[in-house]
Amino acid sequence: MVLDTELVRAAVALAVGILFCVVPSNWIVPPILKLADDAEEIPAPDGIDPGKWKEALTVPNKRAGGMLGFLERLVTLIALAMNAPTVIAAWLAFKVATKWEVWSNVIQVPTKLNDATDISYLSARRKWGSSVFMRFLLGTLSNIILGMVAFGLTWVILRSWSAK
Protein backbone atom coordinates (compact mmCIF):
# COMPACT_ATOMS: atom_id res chain seq x y z
CA MET A 1 0.00 0.00 0.00
CA VAL A 2 1.42 3.35 -1.05
CA LEU A 3 0.71 6.39 1.11
CA ASP A 4 -0.25 9.63 -0.57
CA THR A 5 2.88 11.82 -0.54
CA GLU A 6 0.89 15.00 0.15
CA LEU A 7 -0.82 13.38 3.12
CA VAL A 8 2.50 12.23 4.56
CA ARG A 9 3.99 15.69 4.10
CA ALA A 10 0.99 17.30 5.78
CA ALA A 11 1.22 14.85 8.69
CA VAL A 12 4.95 15.52 9.12
CA ALA A 13 4.43 19.30 8.96
CA LEU A 14 1.62 19.06 11.52
CA ALA A 15 3.79 16.87 13.77
CA VAL A 16 6.52 19.54 13.65
CA GLY A 17 3.92 22.18 14.57
CA ILE A 18 2.68 20.06 17.49
CA LEU A 19 6.25 19.49 18.65
CA PHE A 20 6.78 23.25 18.54
CA CYS A 21 3.69 23.61 20.78
CA VAL A 22 5.40 21.38 23.36
CA VAL A 23 8.79 23.15 23.39
CA PRO A 24 7.55 26.51 24.74
CA SER A 25 6.23 24.73 27.82
CA ASN A 26 9.75 24.64 29.21
CA TRP A 27 11.86 27.30 27.51
CA ILE A 28 9.74 30.20 26.28
CA VAL A 29 6.58 30.66 28.35
CA PRO A 30 8.02 30.30 31.91
CA PRO A 31 10.43 33.25 31.51
CA ILE A 32 7.56 35.33 30.13
CA LEU A 33 5.33 34.40 33.08
CA LYS A 34 8.18 35.15 35.47
CA LEU A 35 7.69 38.82 34.49
CA ALA A 36 4.33 38.72 36.29
CA ASP A 37 5.27 36.46 39.20
CA ASP A 38 5.69 39.17 41.80
CA ALA A 39 3.33 37.50 44.27
CA GLU A 40 6.18 36.03 46.33
CA GLU A 41 7.66 39.51 46.72
CA ILE A 42 4.49 41.22 47.92
CA PRO A 43 4.91 41.84 51.64
CA ALA A 44 2.11 40.86 54.00
CA PRO A 45 -0.10 43.78 55.02
CA ASP A 46 0.53 45.21 58.48
CA GLY A 47 -1.13 42.96 61.06
CA ILE A 48 -1.22 39.81 58.87
CA ASP A 49 0.97 36.75 59.54
CA PRO A 50 3.61 36.66 56.74
CA GLY A 51 3.51 32.84 56.54
CA LYS A 52 -0.25 32.76 56.07
CA TRP A 53 -0.05 35.62 53.57
CA LYS A 54 2.58 33.80 51.48
CA GLU A 55 0.48 30.63 51.59
CA ALA A 56 -2.59 32.57 50.40
CA LEU A 57 -0.67 33.97 47.42
CA THR A 58 0.87 30.64 46.38
CA VAL A 59 -0.41 29.43 43.01
CA PRO A 60 -1.56 25.84 43.42
CA ASN A 61 -0.79 23.24 40.78
CA LYS A 62 1.24 25.28 38.30
CA ARG A 63 1.65 22.09 36.23
CA ALA A 64 -2.03 22.25 35.30
CA GLY A 65 -1.46 25.77 33.99
CA GLY A 66 1.40 24.49 31.84
CA MET A 67 -0.83 21.78 30.39
CA LEU A 68 -3.55 24.34 29.69
CA GLY A 69 -0.97 26.50 27.93
CA PHE A 70 0.11 23.59 25.72
CA LEU A 71 -3.52 22.86 24.85
CA GLU A 72 -4.13 26.54 24.11
CA ARG A 73 -1.20 26.54 21.66
CA LEU A 74 -2.45 23.29 20.13
CA VAL A 75 -6.01 24.61 19.70
CA THR A 76 -4.59 27.71 18.00
CA LEU A 77 -2.45 25.60 15.65
CA ILE A 78 -5.30 23.25 14.73
CA ALA A 79 -7.85 26.05 14.36
CA LEU A 80 -5.57 27.90 11.95
CA ALA A 81 -4.69 24.68 10.10
CA MET A 82 -8.41 24.03 9.62
CA ASN A 83 -9.01 27.67 8.59
CA ALA A 84 -11.34 28.10 11.58
CA PRO A 85 -10.03 31.15 13.48
CA THR A 86 -13.42 31.57 15.16
CA VAL A 87 -12.47 28.58 17.33
CA ILE A 88 -9.71 30.76 18.80
CA ALA A 89 -12.16 33.61 19.39
CA ALA A 90 -14.62 31.21 21.02
CA TRP A 91 -11.87 29.83 23.28
CA LEU A 92 -10.83 33.34 24.34
CA ALA A 93 -14.46 34.30 25.05
CA PHE A 94 -14.91 31.12 27.10
CA LYS A 95 -11.68 31.75 28.97
CA VAL A 96 -12.63 35.33 29.85
CA ALA A 97 -16.15 34.31 30.90
CA THR A 98 -14.92 31.51 33.16
CA LYS A 99 -12.19 33.71 34.63
CA TRP A 100 -14.80 36.39 35.35
CA GLU A 101 -17.11 33.85 37.00
CA VAL A 102 -14.35 32.39 39.16
CA TRP A 103 -13.13 35.81 40.25
CA SER A 104 -16.64 37.10 40.93
CA ASN A 105 -18.04 34.15 42.83
CA VAL A 106 -15.38 31.67 43.88
CA ILE A 107 -12.20 33.50 44.90
CA GLN A 108 -13.46 37.01 45.37
CA VAL A 109 -10.95 38.90 47.47
CA PRO A 110 -12.44 40.52 50.58
CA THR A 111 -12.51 44.30 50.56
CA LYS A 112 -11.07 44.36 54.05
CA LEU A 113 -9.02 42.14 56.35
CA ASN A 114 -9.88 42.85 59.98
CA ASP A 115 -6.29 42.54 61.22
CA ALA A 116 -4.70 44.58 58.40
CA THR A 117 -4.38 48.33 58.15
CA ASP A 118 -6.41 49.71 55.27
CA ILE A 119 -3.53 51.27 53.34
CA SER A 120 -1.17 48.30 53.62
CA TYR A 121 -3.96 45.88 52.59
CA LEU A 122 -4.93 48.12 49.68
CA SER A 123 -1.31 48.19 48.52
CA ALA A 124 -0.86 44.41 48.83
CA ARG A 125 -4.21 43.70 47.16
CA ARG A 126 -3.41 46.00 44.22
CA LYS A 127 0.03 44.43 43.73
CA TRP A 128 -1.31 40.89 43.93
CA GLY A 129 -4.21 41.66 41.58
CA SER A 130 -1.83 43.21 39.08
CA SER A 131 0.45 40.17 39.24
CA VAL A 132 -2.42 37.72 38.66
CA PHE A 133 -3.90 39.82 35.86
CA MET A 134 -0.55 40.19 34.08
CA ARG A 135 0.11 36.45 34.39
CA PHE A 136 -3.29 35.76 32.80
CA LEU A 137 -2.70 38.19 29.93
CA LEU A 138 0.95 37.28 29.29
CA GLY A 139 0.23 33.56 29.41
CA THR A 140 -2.77 33.75 27.10
CA LEU A 141 -1.16 36.07 24.58
CA SER A 142 2.13 34.17 24.48
CA ASN A 143 0.25 30.89 23.94
CA ILE A 144 -1.84 32.32 21.10
CA ILE A 145 1.23 33.86 19.43
CA LEU A 146 3.24 30.64 19.81
CA GLY A 147 0.32 28.64 18.38
CA MET A 148 0.34 31.01 15.41
CA VAL A 149 4.10 30.54 15.05
CA ALA A 150 3.59 26.76 15.12
CA PHE A 151 1.04 27.12 12.32
CA GLY A 152 3.42 29.37 10.38
CA LEU A 153 6.13 26.74 10.76
CA THR A 154 3.85 24.02 9.35
CA TRP A 155 2.84 26.33 6.51
CA VAL A 156 6.48 27.08 5.62
CA ILE A 157 7.33 23.37 5.65
CA LEU A 158 4.40 22.53 3.39
CA ARG A 159 5.17 25.42 1.01
CA SER A 160 8.83 24.43 0.74
CA TRP A 161 7.90 20.83 -0.10
CA SER A 162 5.26 21.81 -2.64
CA ALA A 163 7.77 24.13 -4.38
CA LYS A 164 9.96 21.11 -5.18
Image (cartoon, grey):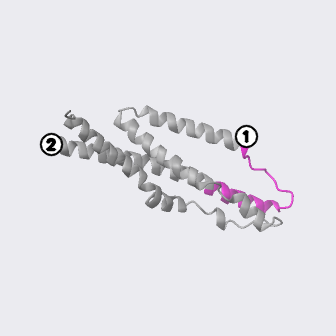
Q: Position of residue 15 (x, y in %)?
A: 33, 45
Left or right placement of residue 111 versus residue 16 in this view: right
Residue 3's disc number = none
For image coordinates 77% across by 67% down, the residue present is: 50
Seen at 65% across and 67% down, the residue is 41
Q: Residue furthest right?
A: 114
In the rendered image, residue 32, in percent from the top left (x then y), is placed at 49, 59
CA gap, disc 2 and disc 1? 55 Å
For the question of whether residue 123 can be seen, the reply is no
Q: Which image quadrant for residue 37?
A: bottom right
Q: Nearer the viewer, residue 24 or 146?
A: 24
* Label 1, residues with CA under 10 Å away: few <14, some 14-19, many ≥20: few
Residue that sits furthest to the front in the current view: 1
Q: Would you identify the image quadrant in which residue 4 lies?
A: top left
Residue 10, image x, y percentages:
27, 39
The residue beneath circle 2 is: 163
Give percent across and percent down for residue 56: 73, 58
- For badge 1, the amino acid type reads Asn
Q: Residue at x 39, y 42 (%)?
A: 77
Q: Quadrant of the N terminus?
A: top left
Tell which circle, 2 or 1, labels the residue nearer the N-terminal end: 1
Q: Which residues are magenta?
A: 106-131
Circle 1 residue: 105
